[in-house]
């Protein structure tokens, strides 16, 4: 096929904003109940509603929660762990009122808790005692922070549950032994986050359902323990990073032993409740681990460790389906996220794809894993995507504009899953580099901890180093470098344009401009996060101010686009609005796009499309690129 020369960034592409949300859903939280399999679907066309879907053994799919119910919890603000299922009955938290409900497929949900300023998450059904054990986050105590506890909610309904354990700032993952005699859970306290240090406790369950004295099995302020799971024989499996990587361990009631020591990660950062990356299954233990940016599924038995070959580079959530199969969420650089049922020999069946169609492979740029030198002699990592379009080629001698993607968290990671948002850019002639800067997960605790005290330093150094690395290799135009990101990635975007002169454009999605305001005003889960990443507040106030873009606008000359949800309780709209007002007054080109009804992350189809169109319009105007599509109306102040 003949390729027509055209300016990079101006190539027409079938991967449009409408295509991105057209038939797509976000898949999550696979779970099995006997032979039935469940998962959640976030549906942009239904205003971002989360729907629990049941797949029966005959392949029939049924929506469990009816259209007026949205299965999401606000606990920790980031949610997760919003449903569980037992004996064909689904229990879930409803987004609008945060009450706990139960429902059978085809029936109307029935409330189990009373109205109130209370949130529930991470459920475990104790059928023998007719109750649900859950994490409760009580915002109605009158205290500055919500009170988090472990509670039991009777299946007869009413009230807000009876407290089983309290005294720690946070709780997660209550899990009961198969015989119902012991309960395990995780807890931790400020200023730790769950990837810094947690404690794994086990307590006997006494006849009235309350808990006896607990034993701390593992953990501490410098050991992150995650995902406790009891096996049939009563032993307790969990993940710990005590050796520098999140590895699997087993506790037999007396001794903790390593299951499969490896310089690899068997878990990720617990930003949400309910993560599950291993389960007793396939005649042993089925587990997902990540190494060098790629996921692997293994089976661990007494005979040894066997990798189960699958054509997926990314695997996320997992659950056992009976004793001989697992269901997991998987994808690759050319395949979207999909629910997959896997046999022990590697045979698999796709149960649901996040999209019913994907673009022609000729438009898909596959991720190339790169590592590059950065500050202080360190290395950082990224996935590079080259421009790709079967109908177009760059002008002679032209190097493409480059967009540097910065992930959120900042304790998070980029993955090589097929992201059509990335392909939107590469199919129009942009290059993309998705950076895993120091502090990202997937590379061990030392790499993750490198950002402690250095947020606003190392993340900027590494994004700049990635851009310069690609420019030096002729893969990007030094005069057309852009940086963009959401949340913590939005902060890195704003800081990079404030404290360096490398980028010529920036796009911040609900990013932080004032670190001090975030430390003072954010929600409980992250209220001491910055103590680790920046310094203790208010003792380190000078450092917070020194790294806050809002207070260094005299250094900002780079055009900026800020996109913000007006219902965001993690990074309030004032963070963006103060920045926009000040830049307008200073004469810096700036555009602001607010979204009614959106929180920390856009979930509605119309808003997802509008945001992407606005960002494309912004870059084409800043870089003087003829737009491939009809431009989104966008008011860029101070742009001549």
Image (cartoon, rainbow, N blue to C red):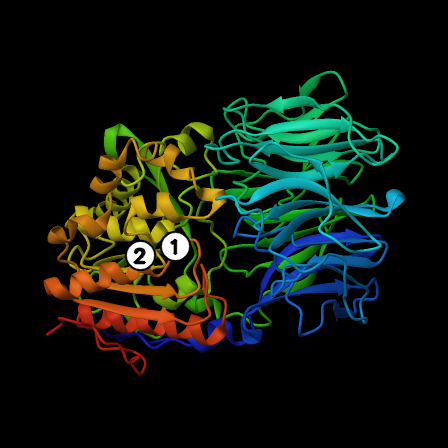
**Residue 194 percent coordinates (x, y):** 53, 36
Is 134 drawn above or below residue 624 in the view shown?
Answer: above
**Residue 592 percent coordinates (x, y):** 28, 68
How many labels, in total? 2
- Residue 283 visible here: yes
**Residue 215 percent coordinates (x, y):** 70, 21
Find disc 2 in the rendering and name its residue.
575
The numbered mark at residue 589 is none
Residue beneath the point at 64% across and 26% down? 260
- Could you tell me how far apart the alpha carbons at marks 2 and 1 are, in whole angstroms? 7 Å
Seen from the viewer's position, the closer of residues 274 and 432 is 274
367 sits left or right of 400 in the view: right
**Residue 175 percent coordinates (x, y):** 74, 38
Residue beneath the point at 68% across and 27% down? 201
- Residue 397 visible here: no
296 sits left or right of 403 in the view: right
Find disc 1 in the rendering and name its residue.
571
Q: Where the N terminus falls, by quadrant?
A: bottom left
Do the CB atoms of the residues marked 2 and 1 lie less than 8 Å apart?
yes
Is 526 drawn above or below residue 577 in the view shown?
Answer: above
């Amino acid at each position: 096929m003949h390729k027509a020369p055209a300016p990079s960034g101006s190539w027409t592409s079938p991967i449009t904003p409408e295509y991105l949300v057209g038939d797509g859903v976000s898949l999550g939280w696979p779970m099995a109940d006997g032979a039935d399999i469940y998962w959640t679907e976030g549906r942009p066309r239904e205003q971002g509603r989360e729907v629990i879907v049941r797949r029966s053994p005959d392949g029939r799919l049924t929506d469990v929660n009816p259209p007026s119910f949205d299965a999401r919890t606000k606990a920790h603000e980031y949610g997760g762990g919003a449903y569980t299922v037992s004996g064909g009955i689904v229990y879930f938290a409803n987004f609008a009122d945060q009450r706990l409900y139960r429902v059978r497929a085809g029936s109307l949900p029935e409330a189990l808790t009373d109205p109130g300023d209370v949130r529930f998450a991470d459920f475990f059904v104790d059928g023998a005692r007719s109750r649900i054990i859950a994490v409760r986050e009580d915002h109605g105590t009158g205290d500055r922070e919500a009170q988090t506890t472990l509670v039991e909610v009777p299946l007869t309904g009413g009230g807000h549950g009876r407290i089983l354990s309290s005294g720690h700032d946070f709780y997660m993952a209550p899990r009961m032994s198969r015989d119902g005699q012991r309960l395990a859970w995780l807890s931790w306290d400020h200023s730790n986050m769950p990837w810094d240090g947690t404690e794994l406790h086990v307590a006997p369950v006494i006849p009235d359902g309350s808990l006896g004295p607990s034993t701390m099995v593992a953990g501490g302020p410098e050991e992150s323990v995650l995902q406790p799971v009891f096996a049939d024989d009563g032993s307790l499996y969990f993940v710990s990073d005590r050796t520098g990587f999140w590895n699997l361990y087993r506790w037999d009631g007396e001794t903790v032993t390593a299951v499969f020591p490896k310089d690899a990660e068997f878990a990720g950062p617990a930003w949400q409740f309910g993560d599950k990356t291993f389960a007793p299954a396939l005649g042993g233990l089925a587990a997902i681990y990540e190494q060098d940016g790629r996921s692997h599924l293994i089976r661990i038995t007494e005979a040894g460790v066997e990798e189960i070959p699958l054509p997926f580079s990314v695997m996320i959530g997992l659950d056992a389906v009976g004793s001989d199969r697992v269901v997991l969420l998987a994808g690759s650089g050319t395949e979207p996220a999909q629910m997959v049922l896997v046999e022990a020999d590697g045979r698999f069946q796709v149960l649901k794809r996040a999209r019913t169609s994907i673009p022609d492979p000729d438009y898909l740029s596959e991720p190339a894993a790169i590592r590059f030198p950065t500050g202080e002699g360190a290395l950082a990592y990224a996935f590079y995507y080259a421009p790709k379009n079967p109908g177009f080629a760059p002008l002679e001698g032209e190097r493409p504009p480059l967009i540097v993607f910065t992930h959120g968290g900042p304790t998070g990671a980029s993955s090589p899953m097929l992201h059509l948002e990335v392909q939107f850019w590469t199919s129009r002639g942009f290059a993309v580099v998705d950076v895993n800067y120091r502090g990202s997960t997937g590379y061990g605790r030392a790499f993750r901890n490198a950002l402690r005290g250095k947020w606003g330093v190392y993340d900027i150094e590494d994004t700049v180093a990635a851009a310069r690395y690609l420019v030096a290799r002729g893969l990007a135009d030094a005069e057309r470098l852009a940086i963009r990101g959401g949340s913590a990635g939005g902060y890195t975007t704003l800081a990079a344009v404030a404290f360096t002169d490398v980028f010529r454009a920036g796009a911040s999605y609900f990013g932080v401009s004032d670190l001090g305001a975030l430390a003072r005003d954010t929600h409980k889960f992250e209220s001491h996060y910055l103590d680790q990443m920046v310094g203790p507040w208010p003792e380190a106030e000078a450092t917070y101010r020194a790294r806050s873009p809002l207070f260094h606008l005299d250094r900002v000359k780079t055009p900026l686009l800020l996109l913000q949800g007006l219902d965001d309780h993690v990074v309030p709209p004032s963070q963006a609005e103060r920045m926009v007002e000040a830049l307008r007054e200073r004469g810096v080109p700036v555009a602001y796009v607010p979204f009614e009804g959106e929180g920390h992350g856009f979930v509605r189809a119309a808003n997802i499309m509008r945001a992407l169109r606005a960002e494309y319009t912004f870059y084409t105007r800043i870089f003087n690129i003829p737009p491939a599509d009809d431009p989104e109306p966008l008011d860029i102040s101070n742009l001549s």
